[in-house]
Image: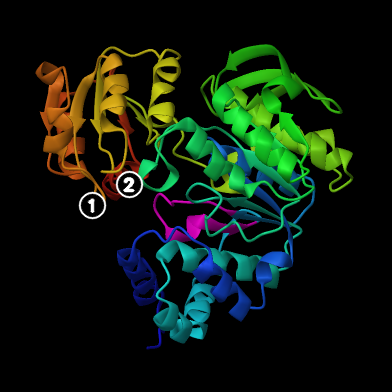
Amino acid sequence: MHFSDFNSCIDYLYSLERVGIKYDLKNIESLCKHLGNPQLKFKSIHIAGTNGKGTVASVLNSIFMEGGYKCGLYTSPHIIDFRERILINGKQIDKQYIIDFTNSIIKLIEKLVPSFFEVTTALAFKYFAEKKVDFAFIEAGLGGRLDSTNIIKPEISIITSISIDHTEYLGDTIEKIAFEKGGIIAENAPVITGRIPDEAMKVIKTQANISDAELINSDKYAKFHNRRIIEKGIGFSIDTKNLKYKSLEFPLNGNYQYINIATAFSALDKLIEAKKADIKEDAVRKGLLNIKKNSGFFGRFDLIHNYPTVVIDVSHNAGGIANLESNLSQLVYNNLFIIFGMMKDKEQELCIRHIEKLEGIIFYTKPDYKRAEEPEVLFSKSRHIERAFITENVIAAKKAAFKKAKPGDLILVTGSFFVVSDFLKCFNSED
């Protein structure tokens, strides 16, 4: 087998999803050994967590880019284009590189039968090593301890948040999930936590002690002053042990962003303190402002259309969806219409309770993805069927919502990366 065009190559990589999730390190270790262990050839920052890890990775990536460093960013999943997952200095990985890489290891893929994520992770590591990045910001895919990304030797580890998610792989209690997330804690390297529950913090403390890792709780380490809502996002001043910045601006909405910013700035503080990086204040200011351009960052309570207002948000678990209420309170609108779909392996009832609190008309739907739940199943779990509809797919949900929404109303698209992806594809195709 040999690929000469990008579409057939990427279709082949997607076909590896049929293997399912491989929650162990055997295949990624074999792949990377074959490639010369590229994951050890650049400085890395490892980020795990139930929610917020993409934001924290993107903030740090953008600040370091503005500081003059060559930066790799590895996140997942993508929203529109596979190449969103792997960036260097804000630019997506070249199509030809993906083709050449896949062709070079096709025999090994057929021998090992790795998962899609395992091959994608090896691709990212090889790309970052070959292009000689100064820093790579690596987001864990699932959990941490046995996630494919957990073969790097990071300068610092970050655990953004811990709540119930992916219970079939990570366990059904906060303590079990904390143990899996805490598996990214590296020997003698600091670990930064976001706001996490006390029972989770006890587990993380134990793991940090075993690894001789300094533990920094960003909730206490970073202090905000003069928090305010600005025209396009939030404004604030922030102090950490070694850093003080006044009147910063961040172009994303939501009170929960303060937790992510505190986590990112605590990591920045420790990297500067250890002389691993030299970042000036101007780079910090520009890094925050340019996060969308530098990190390809979108889909987090993003307003993409007016009259009616359309907001896309990739929240896909109870923790993320619960934040929507405070975000919506910052917007002015008449009626709310919600396009909502979920994956089968999520806490659907709890998420639906949060969605129903928003008191909007809900269009239950299903993205074009094998793990997507049927809209009839989601509807059956609704307590307010008088304001709920079943739509067979996202295209149908979009048509229904726009038919009902008037110019002063708001359409919210949420519940899954895949719902947002399908919505954007049909929304953009009509522009």
Residue segment shown in magenta? 74-88
Does residue 363 lie above or below 113 as drawn?
above
Q: 195 above or below 134?
A: above
Q: Are marks 2 and 1 in contact (CB under 8 Å)?
A: yes
The quadrant of the rendering that contains the C terminus is top left
Residue 62, position as x, y percentages in the image: 67, 44
Residue 298 on the magenta span: no
- Residue 86 sits inside the magenta stretch: yes
Q: Residue 187: tell me if it is visible.
A: yes
Question: In the shown orientation, is residue 391 left or right of residue 430?
Answer: left
Quadrant of the rendered image containing residue 310: top left
Q: Residue 265 versus residue 209: which sits nearer the camera?
A: 209
The residue lying toward the viewer, choosing from 104 and 173, is 173
- Residue on which the image places disc 1: 368
Numbered label attached to residue 418? 2
Residue for point 26% across, 53% down: 369
If you read the primary sequence from the N terminus, does the residue marked by circle 2 or circle 1 appear first? 1
At x 66%, y 73%, the residue is 37
Whether residue 386 sits left or right of residue 239 in the image: it is left
Residue 342: x and y, percent?
28, 39
Amino acid type at circle 2 is: Phe
